[in-house]
Amino acid sequence: MKNVNAKVDVVLIGAGIMSATIGVMLKEFQPDLKIIIIERLDKVGAESSDAMNNAGTGHSAFCELNYTPEKPDGSVDISKALKIASMFELSKEFWSYLVEHKKIATRGVFINSVPHMSFVWGAENVFYLKKRFDALTKHKLFEGMVYSNKWDQLEKWIPLMMDGRDPGIEVAATRMEIGTDVNFGELTRAMFKYLESLDGVELYLNHEVRDIEREEESHWNLTIHDMVTGDKKQHIHSDFVFIGAGGGSLPLLEKSDIEEAEGYGGFPVSGQWLVCKNREVIEQHAAKVYGKASVGSPPMSVPHLDTRIINGKKELLFGPFAGFSTKFLKNGSYWDLVTSLEFDNLFPMLSAGWHNLPLTKYLVQQASQSPEERLEALREYLPNAHMEDWELETAGQRVQVIKKNEEEGGVLEFGTEIVAAGDGSLAALLGASPGASTSVSIMLDVLKKCFKDKMSSVEWNAKLNEMIPSYEKSFVEKPETVTDSREGTSKVLLK
C-alpha cells in the first residue's frame, strides 16, 4: 500500500459485484470522491460473483418457482416475483448506461440471451405451474411467457430433457424467450477496470481488513494486512465504509461494534455443480430450466439445468447440490463459523439452529451424496444422462442471515439484509439470493440509508435519472414503463 495512513472518503471492502456497483455509482454522483477498495484475493470478482460460484445468473423471476409460493387457499403469491423482476429491469438500465457511455463493454462479454424456463412433472405440480402462469401473465413484466403441457412442444423447447422420459407422466413448462444469462464475474471485472481508470480510485489486491474501529466524528480507522509482505501496520481512515465481502461481511461487521449489528449471525451453506464436459450434450440444450425445490431445502438450492456463457463458451451446469461447511467464504477458514460467535448472537444462532434442524439434516444428506445419487437427481431432468459426461465442481459459499426474533429467539433469513450504522457512516450487506441480479437496487438502498441528504439533492437526482430512468416509476402500476425500459436495454445490451 502506497500510504500506510491514507485518508479517503470511501472504503469498499471486497471486490465483488456489490462493491463494484456502489463504487461506480458514487463516482458518477460525485467524481471527486477518493475511494480505496480492499480485496483479500489476487483477483476481483473471484468469490460469490464468479460465474462458477454464483448460483443465479440473471434472476428475473421468470423461472424461479421459489419466488411464487402457494398460499394456504391454493392461490399463488406473485408479489416477490413482481419485486425481483422489477429490480432486475433496473439493473439492466444501469448496465445499459455504462455501456452506452463506453464505461464498460458488452456484445456477449457479460450478458447473453438465454430463454428462461420452469419445468415440472406430476399432476399436482402441473396444476400449480398453470396457476402460476395465469397469475404472472396478468402483468406486463411477464408478457411473452408461454405455457405448454404438450409433449411435442416440449420436445422442441428442451429435446435433451424429453429424450427418454416416461410419456405416462404429466409434464408442463413455461418459457420466456427474453431471458438472459449474466456472467457477474465478467461484469464485476469490467466495472472495476473502469473504476481503476478514474482519478482518486485505488484497488489493493492481496490485502485484508483485520480491524475496524470508530474514530471521532463518525470516521473509521481500518487496520490492513498485506498478505504478500506480511505488513500489519497499514491503516486507512475513511468517512464511509461499505462491507461487501460476501460471507466475510459478518465478521467484519462484528468488528465495527455498531449497535445495529447486535444479534446478527450467519449460517453457512456450501454448494456443488455437476458440470457437463461433453460438448455434444452441451450443444443440445439452450435454456435455464428450473424445477421445484425439495421439501426442506434452502431457496438457493432449487435444482436447475443451466446454460451459461463462461469465457465466451457455452457451458451446461446442473445443481447446485447443497452442503454444509463452517467456512464463510470459498477461500475462507474452517474456523469462520466458530469465530463469528459472540455473546449477543449466540442465543439467536442456537435458536435458529434448533428451529431449522430439518434444514441441517438436509444439508448433511446433500453433502454426503454418492456419485450415483447425484446422477439419479440429474436424471430427473436428463433421463439419459451418463456419469462420464459430467464432473463435480465446488460452487460458491453462502452465509444465510440469522437475526434476533422476540418470539423464536432467532430466525434464519434467505434474502439479503442491509445493516447500517445510525449515522450512515458504515453499511454491510449480509445474505445471498437474489443478490447479484438485484445489486443495483440494493446499492441504491444503501445510498439512501447512508447518503440521505445527497440522494435527495438536485445534482444527485439528475444523475440518478440519467443512469436509471425508471428508478422512481413502478413497473407494476405503469405497465408502459416495462415496454420502454426493455426496448431500450435490449438495443444496448443484446445487439
Image (cartoon, grey):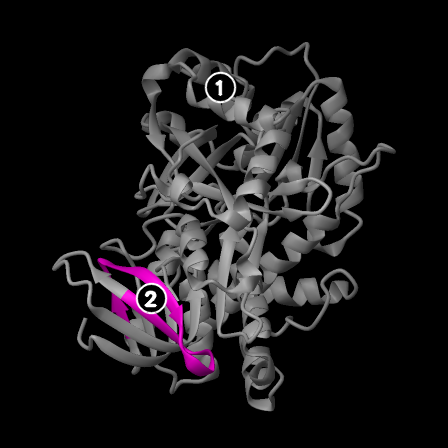
- Which quadrant would residue 485 be assigned to in this image? bottom right
Q: In the rendered structure, which segment of residues is drawn in magenta? A: 202-223
| Rendering coords of residue 286 (x, y %) | 48, 36
Residue at screen point 54% across, 30% down:
303
Say which quadrant the N terminus sits in. bottom left
Q: Nearer the viewer, mark 1 or mark 2?
A: 1
Q: Is residue 58 visible?
A: no
> In this figure, which residue is indicated by the disc labeled 1?
365
| Foreground residue among 244 and 423 | 423
Label 2: which secondary element: helix
| Rendering coords of residue 367 (x, y %) | 43, 23
Amino acid type, mark 2: Phe
| Foreground residue among 425 and 302 | 425
Give the Cα separation between the discs numbered 1 and 2: 39 Å
Question: In the rendered structure, which disc, 1 or 2, sits on the residue that comes first in sequence?
Answer: 2
Amino acid type, mark 1: Gln
Residue 262 highlighted magenta (yes or no): no
